[in-house]
Image (tube, grey):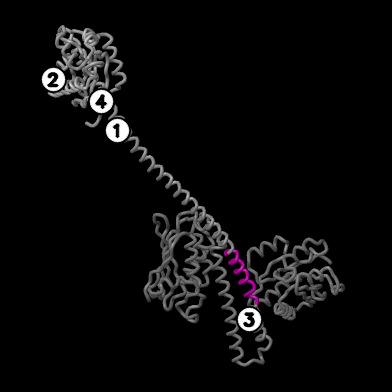
Amino acid sequence: MSDAYVQMIEILLVEDNPGDARLAKEALKESKMSNNLHHVADGVEAMAFLNKEGKYKDMPTPDLLLLDLNLPKKDGREVLAEIKADKKLRRIPVVILTTSKAEADILKTYDLHANCYINKPLDLNQFMIVIKSIEDFWLSIVKLPPK
Amino acid sequence: MNYHISDIINIEKLQSLMQKFTDATGTGTAVLDLKGNVLVASGWQDICTQFHRVHHETKKRCSESDVALANQLGKGKKYNVYRCLNGLVDVAIPINIAGNHIANLFIGQFLSEEPNQEFFRKQAKRYGFNEKEYLLALSKVPVLSDDDVKLKMEYLSDLAVFIGGAGLSNLQLQKLTEELEQRIEERTHDLKDAQVAAVKMMQDAEEARQSAEKANENLKILMVELKRSNEELEQFAYVASHDLQEPLRMVSSYTQLLERRYKDRLDDDAHDFINYAVDGANRMQRLINDLLSFSRITTRGGEFKTTDLNPILGQTLVNLQQRINDTHAIIVNDELPTLAVDAGQITRLFQNLLDNGTKFQVDEAPRIHITVKEQDSDWLFCFRDNGIGIDPQYKDRIFVIFQRLHSKTDFPGTGIGLAVCKRIVERHGGKIWVESELGKGTSFYFTISKRKDTGK
């Protein structure tokens, strides 16, 4: 556990709304854990980042993916499907972070092997708590596969 | 009677019959109608055909004799023996058909005694007949005894009766035939009418079929439109849940972040303003969520399953435990029935009604009594409370979405609870209504159908 505090955690946030991205950043800033938040705004960029293509050549493989569902160019469901179909990427925990409460979205993403599905709370304090919980759970409590 | 003997008696057959009588007896016969027209003639004597009926004066006498003889028959005699003006003897027998005298049968041109040669010689002289030939013809005229005449007359009068009978039969047959033809014509007419009516009916049926087909097509179009409209509604619901909340989150989150980060540098007004902004955003989100869940009562309703409603109420009370504890509410209920329902929705219905019943209360602790009554096709539920009551003029308005009777500060809520209740009850084939008076508590009544096929 103590390793987590010293090791830099790499988080990739796929979120098209800059306001939401910033909120997540702000929430993580208040975190005790040293983390490195990377942000891309659409599904195509997300895949490029994960596959270390072009300008993402030197980027690290993320420890955790925070994925919005409704994204430009390639949406979150497609990104999720591609990750879970890719032997190199499928072990990365994918947390769906969306405002959608639609049952169809919940079922679909779990069918595509999403690791969890979280609704973005409206309230800032709630949001902070959620982000912190994600961080606690996935980066401290859960034992992740070795890189 | 406007028929003629030739209409009802086969004259040709009669001619043949009379000819055979002549062949057998040597006696001439004739059948004449009442106007004196000769219809049948057999075995006429040369003295008549070649002499008496040739010279215009003797011919006139023949006609006069015929008519005179016939006229005497009109008086109802069975037959009449008559000595013709030219010196021969004729016998006439009336032919009656159905009581109508329509013709006469004659035998004649015979003599009842040896002829007076002198009389005929004089007659030959007077009319310029060849005496030798005339007397030769006279010699051929048979001389019949009274008995002989009587015998023949008996036979022929029987024949006349027989002819009359045959004629009557024919007449009746003709009448029947006419009636039959008339009836056939009428029936044909009726049939034609019926046929016309049938054709009309078929046309009507065809029209009805076409209009039904058209209605069916319209229905199909409507179904397609309904499906599309439902899909649009789903789409709307999705947009509402995601896209509308996104900017709301931004408003509320960043105002809150402002407060969090700059707390020390803001004055009291700034804090108030931030609170109003956050509260507005929160309420907006609740409205969106309420609207969404309201629309999903029908679009995303669950399956109807036979459910014991007692544990459903139990679960509702658990959900409302906090409120019940806070308000010291007392809730008592009858034994509830087991019905085919969408359990999730009934939980929500109970919850909304109990929420209302415990909310609209000022002084006392809320008391709610839940009663049920079985009716013919449904169950009647009543949730009676001791709350503030509802002015009867608003009894319909309270079921309309987002309609509120009280300020948000007095009694919080978006005004969706009863609209949701109404929709749930209607989906369960029932009705919901309220009976209340201000200050005297409120009774919410609703029914749930016993049928299992509602909600589809």
Q: Secondary structure at mark 4?
A: helix
Note whether residue A140 is visible.
no
Q: Which residue is mark 4?
A: B5
Q: Specify which label sits upstream in the sequence, 2 or 1.
A: 2
Give me the chain letter of mark 2.
B
Look at discs 1 and 4 and give the one toward the viewer. Answer: 4
Q: CA distance from mark 1 to mark 3?
A: 102 Å
Q: Which residues are magenta?
A: B229-246
Callouts 4 and 2 close, C-beta under 8 Å: no
- Asked if badge 4 and badge 2 are on a common chain, one would say yes
The answer to which image quadrant residue B394 occupies is: bottom left
Q: Residues within 10 Å of mark 4 (few under 14, many from 20)?
A: many
Nearer the observer, B115 or B397? B115
Q: Which residue is mark 2?
A: B77
Give the alpha-carbon distance from disc 2 to disc 1, as whole Å.
Answer: 34 Å
Q: Amino acid at mark 4?
A: Ile
Q: Residue at x 14, y 11 (%)?
A: B119
Q: Earlier in the sequence, mark 3 or mark 4?
A: 4
* Residue B144 lies in quadrant: top left
Dot 2: few (<14), some (14–19), or many (≥20) neighbours within 10 Å? few
Q: What is the three-letter code of the residue carrying label 1?
A: Glu
Judging by the rendered image, the residue that carries numbered circle 1 is B179
Q: Position of residue B390 (x, y in %)?
A: 40, 74
